[in-house]
Image (cartoon, helix red, strand yellow):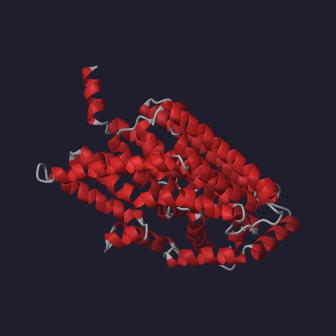
């Protein structure tokens, strides 16, 4: 996509974000938060943007990982790239969750007066009771009731019995593992498997052309999705006791996204992080509007390759993996949300319980699907783990999630943006290890 077209699209997406927020607040919000429900604006956003992007996720994950692995060629180099990628993901998620736990423990947004606490918890529990029960049921159906079960569920997803069934159900972790193995087999086949490699390369090129077409739907889709979000919540509900919680989450996301990740990128890749952030702006704005790192993946790969200067090897391997397991924003949010709820219910967490929060929030973030509000589902793991470590009668009821579920969409949009930014930084870092062959040749000649 040319620079002029990119700038036009950027302006249109920004206009869509602003116009959607104003439309939602002044024409849709009726003073009753949560009453908008499955409004036509949400349906329009889903049909115009979310569904076309979701349609491309499985094909692009499968094909891009195969192309990425076959382009690397040397299996030993794949080990270096894979190990470096996983190390980066684990370290940055631990940093993010530590920032969240530190901020919420220091600022204590849940320390409210008894009157404010009673009003907030009772009202939220009643208003969002059905939504909370639905989220808890989703967590139980997915095996997310304890740390051990969550870890086992991740292992099962990595080794599926039927990859076609995983594709049909939209579970990308098993698809990535299968694509990695198939890519290695194709690379090892040499001349015999070369025609199949060229087929996958041609498929990838065709899919990326489809992505470019869908990207032009982003401004309209973002308008409807943001309009529905603001119309359902209303700006007035971002003021008051719950605003302290939102402020802590956003402060943590800001620290991690604007200071920590740029520092890592500058120190390790000697790259101007804010210039790179601007180059990735379409992916970041799409992440904010769609509230889904998986739905944003096609845009992220396209932006990283065409504007961000990432190698195809890096983008095709690191970004699909990151959209599945790297959730910096979600990990940070899990820590803040859980500790906030314990504070709100008057349960003081000691250092050992905070360590439980840090470790389980990181694990829960890895297991969280790249879909809207997946963090709420995975929060069940963290709460159960902390309740187990507390013992005794003083535990946090799962119904407490109702306190924050009403404003989750706003927070989710911001943490999804940080998730995608974390993936993009990882792709840029790994480009140093795995530049494209053309890039290597140019550097050698220089």
Give the number of callouts.
Answer: 0
Q: What is the quadrant of residue 354 in the picture?
A: bottom right
Q: Where is residue 110 in the image (x, y as percent from the top left)?
A: 76, 60
What quarter of the picture does the N terminus occupy? top left
Q: Position of residue 230 (x, y in %)?
A: 73, 56
| Quadrant for the C terminus in the image | top left
Q: Residue at x 59, y 67 (%)?
A: 379
Examine the rendered structure and indicate whether residue 203 appears above or below residue 233: above
> Quick check: 268 left or right of 130?
left
The image quadrant of residue 435 is top left
Q: Which of 399 and 181 is in front in this view?
A: 181
Q: Which residue is drawn at 70% across and 45% down?
A: 18
Direction right: furthest residue: 115
- Vertically, is 253 above or below 364? above
Return the x and y of residue 440 as percentages of the image width and height.
Answer: 27, 30
Residue 254 at x, y = what percent?
Answer: 63, 44
Is residue 136 depicted above or below 84 in this figure?
below
Say whether residue 182 is visible: yes
Residue under the image location 56 percent in, 67 percent down: 378
Q: In this view, does 118 lie to the left or right of 444?
A: right
């Amino acid at each position: 996509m040319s620079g002029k077209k990119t700038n036009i699209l950027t302006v249109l997406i920004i206009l869509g974000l602003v116009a959607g927020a104003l439309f939602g607040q002044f024409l849709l919000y009726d003073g009753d938060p949560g009453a908008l429900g499955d409004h036509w604006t949400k349906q329009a956003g889903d049909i115009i943007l979310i569904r076309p992007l979701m349609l491309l996720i499985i094909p692009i994950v499968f094909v891009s990982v195969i192309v990425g692995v076959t382009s690397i060629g040397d299996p030993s180099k794949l080990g270096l790239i894979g190990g470096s990628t996983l190390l980066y993901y684990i370290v940055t998620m631990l940093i993010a969750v530590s920032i969240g736990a530190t901020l919420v423990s220091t600022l204590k947004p849940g320390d409210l007066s008894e009157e404010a606490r009673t009003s907030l918890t009772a009202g939220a529990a009643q208003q969002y009771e059905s939504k909370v029960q639905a989220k808890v049921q989703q967590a139980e159906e997915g095996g997310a009731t304890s740390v051990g079960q969550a870890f086992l569920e991740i292992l099962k997803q990595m080794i599926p019995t039927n990859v076609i069934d995983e594709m049909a159900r939209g579970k990308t972790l098993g698809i990535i593992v299968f694509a990695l193995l198939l890519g290695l087999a194709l690379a090892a086949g040499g001349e015999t498997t070369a025609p199949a490699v060229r087929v996958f390369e041609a498929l990838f090129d065709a899919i990326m052309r489809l992505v470019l077409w869908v990207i032009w739907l982003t401004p309209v889709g973002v308008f409807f999705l943001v309009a529905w979000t603001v119309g359902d919540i209303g700006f007035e509900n971002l003021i008051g006791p719950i605003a302290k919680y939102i402020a802590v989450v956003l402060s943590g996301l800001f620290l991690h996204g604007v200071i920590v990740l740029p520092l890592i990128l500058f120190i390790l890749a000697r790259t101007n992080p804010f210039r790179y952030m601007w180059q990735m702006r379409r992916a970041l704005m799409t992440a904010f509007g769609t509230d889904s790192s998986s739905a944003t993946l096609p845009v992220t790969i396209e932006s990283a390759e065409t504007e961000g200067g990432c190698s195809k090897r890096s983008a095709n391997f690191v970004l699909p993996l990151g959209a599945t397991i790297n959730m910096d924003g979600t990990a940070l949010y899990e820590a803040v949300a859980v500790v906030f709820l314990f504070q709100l219910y008057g349960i003081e967490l000691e250092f050992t319980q905070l360590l439980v929060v840090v470790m389980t929030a990181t694990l829960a973030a890895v297991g969280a699907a790249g879909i809207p509000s997946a963090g709420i589902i995975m929060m069940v793991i963290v709460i159960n783990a902390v309740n187990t470590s507390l013992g005794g009668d003083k535990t946090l009821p799962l119904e407490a999630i109702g306190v924050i579920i009403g404003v989750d969409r706003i927070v989710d949009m911001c943490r999804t943006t940080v998730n995608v930014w974390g993936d993009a930084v990882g792709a840029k870092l790994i480009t140093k290890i795995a530049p494209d062959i053309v890039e290597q040749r140019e550097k050698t000649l220089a």
